[in-house]
Amino acid sequence: MASARVLVRRLATGAVPEIVHVERRGAIAVVRLNRPDKLNALNLPMFRAIRDAAKSVEAQAGVRAVVLHGAGRAFCAGLDVKSIWRDPLSAKNTVDELLTRNEVSGATLAQEVGYLWRQMAVPVIAATHGVCLGGGLQIALGADFRFASEDATFSIMESKWGLVPDMAGSLALRELVPLDVAKELTMSARVISAAEAKQLGLVTRVCGSDALGEALAFAAELAARSPDCIAASKALLNANYGRGPAADERGALALEARLQRKLLGSWNQLAAAAKGLGVPAAVQPGFREMDAQWGDEVRNAAGGGGGDAR
């Protein structure tokens, strides 16, 4: 890249703040989610910008480590629900773009914002502070390491909206926590502290008030080592910690996307969203009984079948 500062995405023509900022500090690429007025919540332009940032970093020569963090008071508050669902036609187009699978990567746009960091040869460190919820946690789970300030809070928030996590975070969960813990966090949408996240294995290090500073120092330490050794170590440990062959990961991504498409727009998903948005209880739609198809899905998953994304 000709410049150390890379403009990843502009929301419109004219001078506007870049919503994801990439800065080179020697051999370290520092990627900042830069929508602080919205606690770095994810709208469609931000999904695109994070994907583009990951690709731009991967294409840069000499990068030996990446630090990912959020501007302002938080790492990322998750999905910008009001932006995504502002009108039915826009919501449909947004969902189609987010959940259409890229045949090259095997991932959807929603998944690429986490999955592309996992695929990088260099180590990626997520420095989290404030809220790290829903999609924000899914992005952090795509990193190799998660450093958290003491004030950081975490949640797999998607069930609040009647959805499953669909940004490749389930790949990391299977490596980090036991199955029952993953289920408890996913089904309850419980918000946990940095200390509990560390105890459970979701967080690598709790860093007082300066997760970013410690992440940068650790990145510098790794960048000073043989890049071949670091890349080989990442590949070796990824393979031996249960990720399996690439085809298995592609199958897991396809399953995420397929289940999410089934959920979106269903009665119970919309009922969950209404509750999450604070619709008055008197007019909130109630949940219906579980559709029989979900029993089939659980049985298929237990038997190892995932199917293709549709």
Image (cartoon, rainbow, N blue to C red):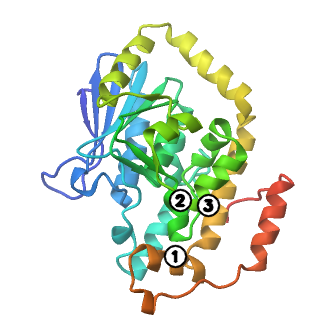
Which residue in the protein does label 1 denote?
272
User: Which three-letter amino acid code belongs to the residue tagged 2?
Assistant: Ala
Q: Residue furthest bottom?
A: 282
The reply to whether the C-beta atoms of the residues labelled 2 and 3 are less than 8 Å apart is yes
Residue 189: assigned label:
2
Give the secondary structure at mark 1. Answer: helix
Is 173 left or right of 28, judged from the image as shown?
right
In this rendering, the count of numbered labels is 3
Residue situated in front as seen by the camera: 303 or 109? 303
Q: Left of 209 or right of it: where is 246?
A: right
Q: Nearer the viewer, residue 175 or 281?
A: 281
Above or below, comparing residue 227 to residue 17 in the picture: above
10 Å crowding of disc 1: few (<14), some (14-19), many (20+): many
Residue drawn at the location 73% of the way across and 59% of the way down:
308
Q: Is residue 120 above or below residue 187?
A: above
Residue appearing at x 56%, y 70% in the figure: 162
Q: CA distance from mark 2 to mark 1?
A: 12 Å
Query: Where is residue 85 drawn, in percent x and y?
Result: 39, 74
Q: CA distance from mark 1 to mark 3?
A: 13 Å
Q: Can you identify the residue that label 3 sits on?
A: 187
| 123 or 204, nearer to the observer | 204
Kind of residue at disc 3: Met
Q: Position of residue 171 (x, y in %)?
A: 64, 43
Quarter in which the C terminus is drawn: bottom right
Asked whether residue 62 is in view, the answer is: no
Residue 261 appears in view: yes
Dot 2 or dot 1: first in sequence order is 2
Quadrant location of the N terminus in the rendered image = top left
Q: Image quarter for residue 119? A: top right
Query: Above or below — where is 19 with respect to 307?
Result: above
